[in-house]
Amino acid sequence: MHQRIAQFAVTVLDYDDAIGFYVEKLGFTLLEDTDLGGGKRWVRVRPPGTAEAAILLACATTPEQAASVGNQTGGRVFLFLETDDFWRDYEALRSRGVRFVRPPSEESYGTVAVFEDLYGNKFDLIQPRGSADCRPQEVRS
C-alpha cells in the first residue's frame, strides 16, 4: 500500500491576505485559486521545488474555525519547512519581513529558527544535520 498526505488545511481569516503572505513573503507557489461560489475558494500553495504536500488555505466561516486561526496547534510549532540552505532562506525570509520568534540555533538535528505566519502559527525553518554546510557564509573555510 502507498499512502501520502497530499494536502492539509490551515484556517485563515482572508484568502487574499493569506495568499500574499505565503506567496510573497514565504516564496511559496500558488497552485490553485478556484472560486467555488458563495465567497468560498479552493486555494492551494506549497514551497518551491517540491511536489509534496500542499497547504489548503481555508477561510474560517464559523466562530469555532475563527478561534483556530493562528493557533492550529495550541502554540506549538505547526509546520516544519526543511531547506537545503538554511542561511540563504533565513536571510531571504527576513528581508521579506517574516517575523522570527526564535533566533537560529544549532541543534543535534540541524540548524533551526522559528517564525510565525501572518496569524501567529509557528513554523520551524530547518536544515537537517548532514544535508549541507549549515554554517553562515562568513564562518565557512
Image (cartoon, rainbow, N blue to C red):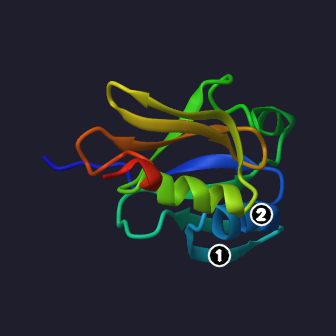
Image x and y of residue 136, in percent: 45, 49
Above-or-below relation of 58 to 78: below
Which element is circle 2 on?
Answer: helix
Q: Amino acid at mark 2?
A: Tyr
Q: Residue at x 76, y 57 (%)?
A: 97
Above-or-below relation of 95 to 125: below
Q: Which mark is residue 33?
A: 1
Q: Which mark is residue 68?
A: none
| The one of 134 and 96 positioned closer to us in this rendering | 134
Say whether disc 2 or disc 1 marks the residue closer to the N-terminus.
2
Image x and y of residue 100, in percent: 68, 41
| The one of 27 and 14 positioned closer to us in this rendering | 27
The answer to whether mark 2 and mark 1 are in CB contact below 8 A is yes
Horizontal side of 92 relative to 8 (left or right) equals right
Image x and y of residue 124, in percent: 53, 39
Toward the front, the furthest residue is 141
Q: Amino acid at mark 1?
A: Asp
| The one of 123 and 35 positioned closer to us in this rendering | 123
Q: Quadrant of residue 74?
A: top right
Above-or-below relation of 45 to 65: below
Name the residue beneath numbered marker 2: 15
Mark 2 is surrounded, within 10 Å at the Cα level, by few (under 14), some (14 to 19) or many (20 or more) other residues, namely: some
Image x and y of residue 69, in percent: 76, 39
Q: Residue at x 70, y 47 (%)?
A: 117
Horizontal side of 4 relative to 15 (left or right) equals left
Toward the left, the furthest residue is 1
Above-or-below relation of 28 to 87: below
Q: CA distance from mark 2 to mark 1?
A: 9 Å
Which element is circle 1 on?
Answer: strand
Horizontal side of 69 relative to 74 (left or right) equals right
